[in-house]
Amino acid sequence: MPKVETFDRTHVLQKATEVFHKKGYNGTSMQDLVDATDLNRSSIYNSFGSKLGMFMEVLSHYQNNANTNFSKEVVNAYNAIDAIEGIFTITLKDILGDDDRKGCLIVNCKSEMSNQNSSIKNFMESNQERMLAMLEDIISKGQMEKIFNENQSANQYAWYLYTSIQGLRMTGILNKNEGDLKNIINTVLNVLY
Amino acid sequence: MPKVETFDRTHVLQKATEVFHKKGYNGTSMQDLVDATDLNRSSIYNSFGSKLGMFMEVLSHYQNNANTNFSKEVVNAYNAIDAIEGIFTITLKDILGDDDRKGCLIVNCKSEMSNQNSSIKNFMESNQERMLAMLEDIISKGQMEKIFNENQSANQYAWYLYTSIQGLRMTGILNKNEGDLKNIINTVLNVLY
DNA sequence: ATAGAGATGAAATGATCGTTTCAAATGTAT
DNA sequence: ATACATTTGAAACGATCATTTCATCTCTAT
């Protein structure tokens, strides 16, 4: 029977993620991926099918990481305010730690590719659904607990927060001033209270 | 003395803008530009120097258009509320008219290139300054007229609105539902009243 | 031990990349 | 009309693109 895949797939995906994140999809060459992963060309094609195949797996990997972080924060939150603030705190931390101004891989990819590739578009739509569902759920709870107002429906506020997060990631590419960013977040969240 | 440039530079820039907007910088090839502009390769290099040179001019062209639209709206506005709403209305109209989900050229470019090319980074920083100055100016006036609250400084609100606009452009790539978008805008602007 | 399935390495595929070259065409100032 | 700076067209540049090929190596199941 077969020789089994020897490389650490997760480690390879992390290395590939770094390259795609830094250079974007179209800016990344297969040679870049070969160099970054220390894998042979053939092994990449054997294991991931194509550059796009590898990128899709990178996207999922990145999304799963983010989801895990968000979920952890939401589950441990005392209440809805804590949960929402946790989500924005994670986002803020990610922005401040992004020394080379790469921004968010998913936001970048949405802007680069969702009008060019239907697999990417589908991924982005389901990512959007996931984010909206998470936010709407927290807001609903907050409204039931009467710590969030009911001026707008939970779904409407979810769209608002989803939009704010994307905006924050865009602003955070060039502005890493923690005070500025925290202020934006406060202004965004004050709408709910 | 010389034969003079025969082609319509503005028309060429518009055609080039369409291509770059649709495919992004790295996704656009010189052949794409030759095809779109009906210019010869040599003429492009003669007149624009390089692919990046042409792109920079496209960016300025796009920015000037946007600035003109914004200024017109702001100048004709009755008051600060009108001015800010005008800016968001223009943005909304642009999103709704963007049938092929290209998003905003400047936002896309910021996410694709500001960490890779210092000319682009400089452009984006000055674009940011311009936007912030415009917004801060309107907000200041609105606060002096007492139609905007003073919970935050004009500069802080400017950052908040700038972030919201970028977020709106990201959300607008996949969501063209006018009701959803208007609702987001209303929620954003209610903070000021 | 050995057969055989899959991983690997290195080279080559044709296509396309951004850019350059240069002779020929063009139009203006004299 | 003529001189000549500039634009234009077409071909070619070497480099790099994503992907394929295939012989060799490696490991597992028998």
Image (cartoon, coloured by chain):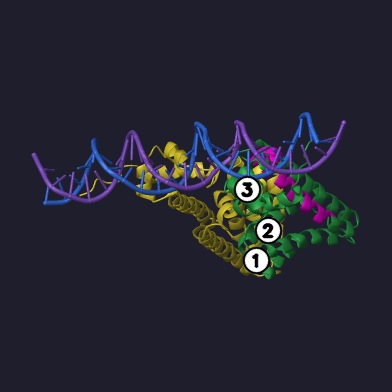
Chain colours: A yellow, B green, C purple, D blue
Tell me the crowding category of disc 1: few under 14, some 14 to 19, or many 20 or more residues within 10 angstroms, Cα based: some
Q: What chain does badge 3 belong to?
A: B
Q: Which residue is mark 2?
A: B168
Label 2 SS: helix
Q: Is residue A62 within the magenta segment?
A: no
Q: Quick check: A33 left or right of A165? A: left
Q: Are marks 2 and 1 on the same chain?
A: yes
* Disc on the earlier residue, 2 or 1: 2
| For the residues bearing labels 3 and 1, Cβ distance under 8 angstroms | no
Say what amino acid the circle numbered 2 marks.
Answer: Leu
Q: Quadrant of residue B113?
A: top right
Q: Dots 2 and 1: beta carbons under 8 Å? A: no
In percent of width and height, residue B117 lies at 63, 38
- Label 1: chain letter: B
| Number of numbered discs visible in the structure rendering | 3
Front residue of A143 and B149: B149
Amino acid beneath label 3: Val
Q: Is residue B29 visible?
A: no
Secondary structure under the numbered disc 1 in the rendered image:
loop
Counting residues from the start of the chain, the first of labels 3 and 1 encountered is: 3
Task: Characterize the magenta stretch by its predominant secondary structure.
Answer: helix
* Closer to us: B29 or B90: B29
Is A76 left or right of B68, judged from the image as shown? left
Q: Residues within 10 Å of mark 3 (few under 14, many from 20)?
A: some
Residue B141 coordinates in the image, percent (x, y): 88, 53
Residue beneath disc 3:
B34
Bounds of the magenta segment: B46-71
N-term mark: 3 or 2 = 3
How far apart, in angstroms, are the residues tagged by discs 3 and 1? 32 Å
Q: Identify residue for label 1.
A: B176
Residue B100 image offset from top left, x and y in percent: 62, 62
Tell me the CA gap for discs 3 and 2.
33 Å
